[in-house]
Amino acid sequence: MSIKSVPDDIGSEEFANWLQSLRRDIHRHPETAFKEERTSNLVANLLESWGLVLHRGLAKTGIVATLHGKRGPGRTIGLRADMDALFIDEKNNFKHKSCQQGVMHACGHDGHTAMLLGAARLLAKNPDFKGTVQFIFQPAEESEGGGRVMIEEGLFDMFPCDAVYAVHNAPGLPTGDFAIRSGPMLAAGDTWEVEFSGSGGHGAMPHTATDPITAAGAFINTVSTIVARNVPSSEAAVLSIGHIHAGDYNSPNIIPGNVLIRGTARSFTAETRDLLEDRLHCLADHNARAFQCEAAFRFIRRYPPLVNRQDQVDIAAQAARHVAGDDRVTTDIDPIGGSEDFAFMLEEVPGAYMLIGNGPGPFVHSDTYDFNDDILLTGVRYWMALVSMELDGQTS
Ligand SMILES: [Zn+2]
Ligand SMILES: [Zn+2]
């Protein structure tokens, strides 16, 4: 695909075809966290060829591209797309299947990148707005916190924004519908672990040992009381244990000296997040002491809750209604237990995270998932409407 020949008429078949081939090209060449070099080069070359001013290298492969409106200075907004793929072996058999074994665009970030590039193409051709748009292409959304790293490396110091926006596709939501909520929309996703240690000993003489298995068993039974007894009924939270390791398969007659338990914690407010950490820590310590063992506890904060602001939700929903019609935009969906790196950006700058329906089909992170090309133009139109709403107060 020649960069120079990129079409610039959103209503034309050529533009739709270009957008689809761009999305499929990215899908075929997936790259994981902080290694999105081909993708980053592709994005940068296109943006540069359209005359945008680029800053590269934030969080290794991240890009910020600046576009000033032709109607003079005004507000600045950041539009974010994520570029990374996952360690999944793709099971699809279509032509644009991943050419990288074990790596797959299974979350639709190929589509997010293509949609934001499509909007950048059209806005670069006719920047008919007041103020500035920062196009933010971030690496490592999946579990590595690339957005957080961009912020730590000065994203909003170098490129201050008055508001930030992101879009994520949502399998299960009808094709091209939009969904959002104000306030907490996605959960904080944290990892916790406890290592119980005792003396261990001969399985036939437990009275000579201190047994961390007993302490761990008692602890496991009390974990479920945290959500049931400590979290207010108006709040949602989840604690799950996903990993337990102790002893050796070949040694059932030995009481091990250590038991490791690892789990996940999900919450929607800073207060509940702190409460989960405190109560887990307390129960780990006291159950250990009750059985003459010790507990080493760690709570590893990964992603904060994603909290949308009402003002930006109103603008985002208005843009979505302009594109899809009133009856295809929901503004009060239930909070979702998943997590998202964009939450770090929303801690710094007010904004809104919008879902766009990917239609029926496998959920994200499935090895048979694919981004729905039918929503590419819808996504571009959403971005265009949002820029108009935000920077002109109108959709024309
Ligand atoms: Zn994902
Ligand atoms: Zn994703």
Image: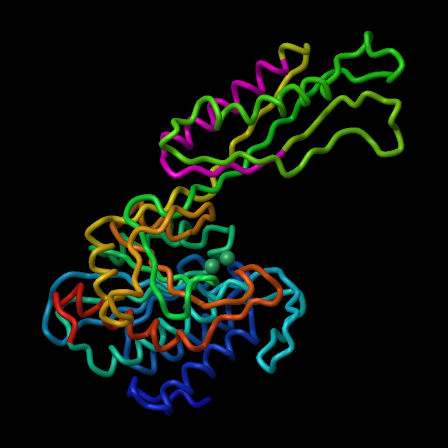
- The coloring applied to the image is rainbow
Q: Quadrant of the C terminus?
A: bottom left
> Where does residue 328 sit, x and y in percent of width and height?
31, 65
* Camera sees residue 62: no
- Tell me: 353 left or right of 251: left
* Position above or below: 313 against 323: above
Q: Main secondary structure of the magenta part?
A: helix
Which residue of the protein is positioned furthest toward the top in this rendering? Answer: 207
* Camera sees residue 21: yes
- Tell me: 388 left or right of 320: left
Which residue of the protein is positioned furthest toward the front in this rendering? Answer: 327
Q: Was residue 171 drawn as part of the magenta stretch in this picture? A: no
Q: Was residue 268 drawn as part of the magenta stretch in this picture? A: yes
Which residue of the protein is positioned furthest toward the left in this rendering? Answer: 72
Q: How many marks?
A: 0
Magenta-drawn segment: 262-288
> Where does residue 297 sit, x and y in percent of width and height?
57, 25
x 72%, y 18%: residue: 214
* Position above or below: 77 against 241: below
> Where does residue 357 sit, x and y in percent of width and height?
41, 65
* Position above or below: 18 against 79: below
- Tell me: 16 left or right of 189: left
Q: Quadrant of residue 75?
A: bottom left
Residue in the foreground of this view, choosing between 13 and 296: 13
> Where does residue 136 sit, x and y in percent of width and height?
34, 63
x 55%, y 19%: residue: 283
